[in-house]
Amino acid sequence: MNFLKRFGKSVDGVVKSVVTKSKDISGIAKLNSEITKLKDQIENEYSEIGKNAYQANVEGVEDLKMSESIAKIKSIFVQIDVKNDVVLVLKGITICPKCGEELDMECAFCGKCGAEIERDV
């Protein structure tokens, strides 16, 4: 009987772990989808810049719409960086500042280049 209770608790723990992991994976997938949409917005803004630059050239005037598009692109890049940082946290990894290698959050040094990984206190 004790065996069945221990087995039940063990299975319950595994199920909870799987549920937690699937939520993390779901969250990562959602963030990656949002990142893709933001990148699409950047491509649209690039297209607008091209159209505006062409029109300004044809008309021989400076176009303020281009400045607005550039500001939008910068803002979207910031949003992408934030979402990418959240994905890294959910995955439990960090990036080596020297070589860009993905590392486990617990690493003190990069396994690829040997750089020390600084921790936020």
Image: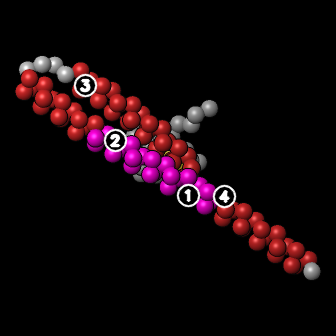
Neighbours of disc 2 within 10 Å: few (<14), some (14-19), many (20+):
some
Residue 55's x, y, as percent?
Answer: 12, 29
Residue denoted by label 3: 65
Q: Which mark, by number, is residue 20? A: 4
Question: Which element is circle 2 on?
Answer: helix
User: Which residue is nearer to you in this view: 43 or 115?
Assistant: 43
Cα separation, mark 1 vs mark 3, equals 39 Å
Quarter of the picture holding the N terminus: bottom right
Question: Which element is circle 1 on?
Answer: helix
Residue denoted by label 2: 41
User: Which residue is nearer to you in this view: 66 or 13?
Assistant: 66
Residue denoted by label 1: 25
**Mark 3 or mark 4, which is nearer to you?**
3
Residue lying at the far top of the rendered structure: 61
Cα separation, mark 2 vs mark 3, equals 16 Å
Quarter of the picture holding the C terminus: top right
Residue 11 in which image quadrant: bottom right
Cα separation, mark 3 vs mark 4, equals 46 Å
